[in-house]
Amino acid sequence: MEFTIFGHDLQVVDIRLKSGETVYSESGGMAWMSDNISMNTEMKGGLMGGLKRKLMGESLMLTDYTCQGAEGLVAFASEFPGKIVPMTLAPEQIMVCQKDSFMCAEAGVQLEMHFNKRLGAGLFGGEGFILQKVTGPGQVFFELAGHIVEYTLVAGQRLKVDPGYLALMEPSVQFDIEMVKGVKNILFGGEGLFLANVTGPGKVWLQSMPLPNFASRLIPYLPSKG
């Protein structure tokens, strides 16, 4: 397969498939496709697999898109302003991401739940105990909100992050939550009660526009009843 990413803020990934190649996404994720692409929607993993995906912020059903001719195309569009991040995962290579980040992937990539084992991170981390885990081999695409900044942390190097800005990380990165220190910082700092500690070694990808933050900014401008 080959792919091209178009656009700047509302991006589209155009994937070219050869005969027999398959990509999959959550149901409703496809934007357009050629007429030689076949669709097959099913609840992969049975009812429990579907319910687990629902907890991850994905749909109960997943849809396979398979090329039936010499070459076909299928395109997926981002649901919000941001960037599409492509990754080619080696066999057994894992990436951990926030809910709703998974866009689509080759058939060989596994999409599963990832439980955050640290109690503080689970209760106050913004994404709860349940994150998404994708495992190679294969090509996978993530959709992240706003501008994306990538950091490579060495062993023991720590970064404090507002939890909503943490989008994607390697499994070697440790993730925990600490309470903001100082009464004035809590009351007037505007950062909430908690910050995330991410500790290397490993890479992290931060997004500049967490969707809950963006939505809260729009609320004062929305019409209200009465």
Image (cartoon, rainbow, N blue to C red):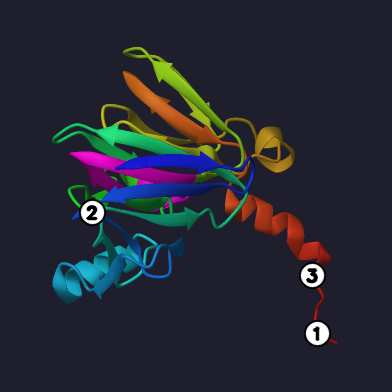
Horizontal side, residue 201 vs residue 225: left or right: left
Q: 28 or 32, which lies in front? A: 32
Residue 197, located in which quarter of the rendered image?
A: top left
C-alpha distance separating marks 2 and 1: 41 Å
Q: Is mark 2 on a helix, strand or loop?
A: strand
**Which-is-in-front pick, marks 1 and 3?**
3
Residue at which label 2 appears: 112
Say which residue appears at 60% left-offset and 35% top-offset. Answer: 147
At label 1, the amino acid type is Lys
C-alpha distance separating marks 3 and 2: 36 Å
Q: Circle 3: is it few (<14), some (14-19), or many (20+) Cα within 10 Å?
A: few
Residue at which label 3 appears: 222
Say which residue appears at 70% left-offset and 42% top-offset. Answer: 187
Horizontal side, residue 57 vs residue 60: left or right: right
- Furthest toward the front, the residue is 70
Residue 122, position as x, y percentages in the image:
36, 49
Look at the picture and state if 86 lies above or below 51: above
Residue at which label 1 appears: 225
Horizontal side, residue 182 vs residue 18: left or right: right
Residue 35, position as x, y percentages in the image:
37, 68
C-alpha distance separating marks 1 and 3: 10 Å
Residue 86 visible in this rendered orientation of the protein: yes
Residue 36, position as x, y percentages in the image:
32, 65
Task: Look at the image and give the residue range highlighted in magenta.
Answer: 120-143
Q: Circle 1: is it few (<14), some (14-19), or many (20+) Cα within 10 Å?
A: few
Say which residue appears at 54% left-offset and 39% top-offset. Answer: 165
Does the magenta portion include 56? Answer: no
At label 2, the amino acid type is Glu
Q: Is mark 3 on a helix, strand or loop?
A: loop
Q: 208 or 198, which lies in front? A: 208
